[in-house]
Image (cartoon, coloured by chain):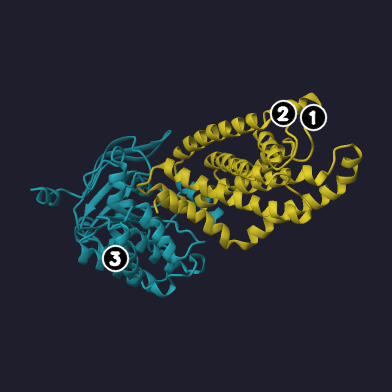
């Protein structure tokens, strides 16, 4: 195993050992699935949208990936505060490899979290129409995980401590989630929201995942895949640049 | 002959080193050298420029001007070669609390590309050396301050560096632990001929273990030599007295320079 591998493994071990974090981060998706899914279900059905759980589940899977991935990226702040970042930055491993290892590790953790939520969705009543498309769905899940781990890393490279955290939560993560079409269809919205959500990469991630799991497409699979992959590359590059500039 | 040449050259060479942060000159024109196999103490009041100098020697900061050679390598242009030449124990802990002692060691070994065949053997030897072998599978967060420091020293040695940098290795440790720490380090220095470059606030430690001492204040080296030479030059009986005479203040007092202020501020966050 090389440096990238050990960075990856470290993220996984930390996640696996922190059972509280693992279980705690399942609370929010379960709450959203049950409260929104069953709460808005009847209205959604009356409005002619069909089963709301079928619509909502991919959005909630994407949500849990978004949160876990962003927090994994943010772990750099902890590493900085607890000193471990110095250990990696002073080693003869290039910053880009450290960044790749960390991002892959964080993304794997977020992806696994997404799988757990997917299983929870099955328990609540969500059904996949075509299992042949499941691998495509998993690909979208992993891309979403990669994209937002890289974004978290990019932001964390610039943050000195946790003080800016509420700001980050309320002005980045929440808007990305709420304006992504995870909770409601993007058709027929006020034009301001339509514009904002079309600039939100998670919109494409959610759309791709939903389509792969059997929902109806909004942008179309090809565009979804292209946008998510492209934004992941761009943010990955920006994140690597900012990470390479960290001074301690 | 290559080996001869290396021996006759100082292992750490610093010439006219300078570092400024905006208008603040943290290090102004420092020149010194450390011979291979020396125990070298780098002393100075808080905010004198010790940590900034160590950061430049260990590739973490780029000098504003001046020359540095670590084991013959330039830390700016030959970063990786320089990095493989030294081990470092930072002032603040830099272990992963959520990993075990063994995993922390293994992580380091892989980052430094220690070949698989020797990796485990070295980790075992070192963990036994710092008396942590029976706790190898405990998470580091369960360790005491002294155990963490010992583990950091062991970790810094896995890749068999020629030089070990220690920034305040005994800060915050009880006298017994401090004592045994220096015994480890002296044993390494004697047995392996490893160069040890350290800073400390404890003058009696520096006096006891250092072959040579450099005293830095206001970003400049104001005196260097053996403890005896320093005492003779200042006509004092202990190193502590000569230090006070040279720097004009007690080493343990906190100076509100911007860097030490920042460090304190960051440490508040940590605890």
Indicate the position of residue B80 as horizontal and vertical percent values.
31, 44
Q: Which of labels 2 and 3 is toward the front?
A: 2
B261 vs B76, left or right, is right
**Residue at position x 44%, y 54% from top?**
A6
Whole-Å distance between the Cαs marked 1 and 3? 69 Å
- Frontmost residue, B89 versus B271: B89
Label 1 secondary element: loop
The hue in which chain B appears in the rendered picture of the protein: cyan
**Residue at position x 43%, y 33% from top?**
B22
Contact between marks 2 and 3 (CB within 8 A): the answer is no
| Pointer 1 chain | A
- Frontmost residue, B64 versus A220: A220
Indicate the position of residue A129 as horizontal and vertical percent values.
73, 44
- Frontmost residue, A106 versus B64: A106
Label 2 secondary element: helix
Question: What residue sits right under mark 3 in the picture?
Answer: B185
- Frontmost residue, B248 versus A218: A218
| Quarter of the N terminus of chain A within the rendering | bottom left
Question: What residue sits right under mark 1 in the picture?
Answer: A187
A97 vs A33, left or right, is left
The hue in which chain A appears in the rendered picture of the protein: yellow
| Quarter of the C terminus of chain A within the rendering | top left
């Amino acid at each position: 195993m090389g440096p990238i591998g050990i960075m990856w493994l470290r993220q996984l071990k930390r996640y696996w050992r922190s059972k509280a974090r693992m279980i705690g981060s399942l609370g929010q998706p379960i709450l959203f699935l049950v409260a929104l899914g069953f709460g808005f279900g009847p209205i959604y059905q009356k409005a002619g949208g069909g089963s709301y759980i079928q619509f909502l589940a991919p959005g909630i899977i994407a949500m849990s990936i978004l949160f876990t991935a962003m927090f994994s990226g943010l772990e750099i702040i902890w590493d900085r505060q607890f000193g471990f970042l110095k250990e990696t930055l002073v080693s003869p491993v290039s910053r880009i490899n450290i960044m790749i290892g960390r991002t892959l590790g964080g993304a794997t953790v977020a992806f696994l979290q997404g799988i757990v939520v997917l299983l929870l969705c099955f328990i609540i009543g969500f059904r996949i129409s075509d299992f042949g498309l499941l691998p495509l769905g998993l690909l979208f899940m992993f891309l979403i995980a990669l994209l937002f781990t890289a974004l978290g890393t990019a932001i964390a490279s610039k943050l000195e401590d946790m003080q800016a955290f509420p700001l980050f939560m309320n002005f980045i993560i929440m808007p990305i989630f709420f304006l992504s079409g995870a909770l409601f269809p993007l058709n027929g919205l006020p034009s301001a929201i339509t514009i904002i959500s079309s600039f939100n990469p998670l919109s494409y991630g959610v759309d791709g995942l939903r389509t792969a799991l059997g929902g109806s497409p909004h942008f179309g699979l090809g565009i979804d895949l292209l946008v998510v992959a492209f934004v992941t590359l761009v943010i990955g590059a920006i994140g690597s640049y900012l990470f390479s500039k960290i001074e301690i | 002959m290559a080996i001869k040449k290396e021996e006759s050259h100082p292992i750490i060479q610093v010439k006219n080193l300078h570092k400024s942060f905006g208008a603040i000159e943290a290090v102004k024109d420092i020149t010194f050298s450390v011979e291979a196999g020396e125990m070298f103490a780098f002393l100075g009041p808080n905010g004198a420029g010790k940590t900034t100098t160590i950061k430049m020697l260990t590739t973490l900061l780029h000098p504003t001007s001046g020359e540095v050679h670590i084991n013959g390598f330039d830390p700016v242009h030959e970063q990786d070669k320089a990095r493989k030449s030294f081990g470092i124990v930072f002032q603040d802990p830099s272990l992963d609390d959520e990993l075990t002692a063994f995993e922390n060691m293994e992580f380091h070994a892989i980052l430094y590309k220690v070949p698989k065949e020797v990796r485990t053997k070295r980790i075992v030897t070192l963990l036994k050396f710092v008396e942590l072998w029976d706790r190898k599978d405990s998470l580091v967060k369960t360790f005491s301050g002294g155990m963490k420091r010992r583990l950091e020293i062991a970790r810094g040695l896995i890749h068999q560096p020629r030089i070990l940098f220690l920034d305040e290795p005994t800060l915050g440790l009880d006298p017994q632990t401090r004592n045994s720490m220096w015994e480890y380090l002296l044993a390494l220095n004697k047995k392996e001929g490893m160069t040890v470059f350290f800073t400390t606030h404890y003058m009696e430690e520096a006096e006891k273990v250092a072959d040579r001492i450099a005293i830095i204040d206001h970003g400049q080296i104001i005196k260097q030599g053996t403890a005896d030479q320093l005492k003779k030059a200042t006509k004092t009986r202990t190193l502590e007295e000569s230090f006070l005479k040279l720097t004009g203040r007690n080493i343990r007092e906190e100076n509100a320079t911007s860097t030490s202020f920042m460090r304190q501020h960051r440490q508040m966050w940590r605890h």
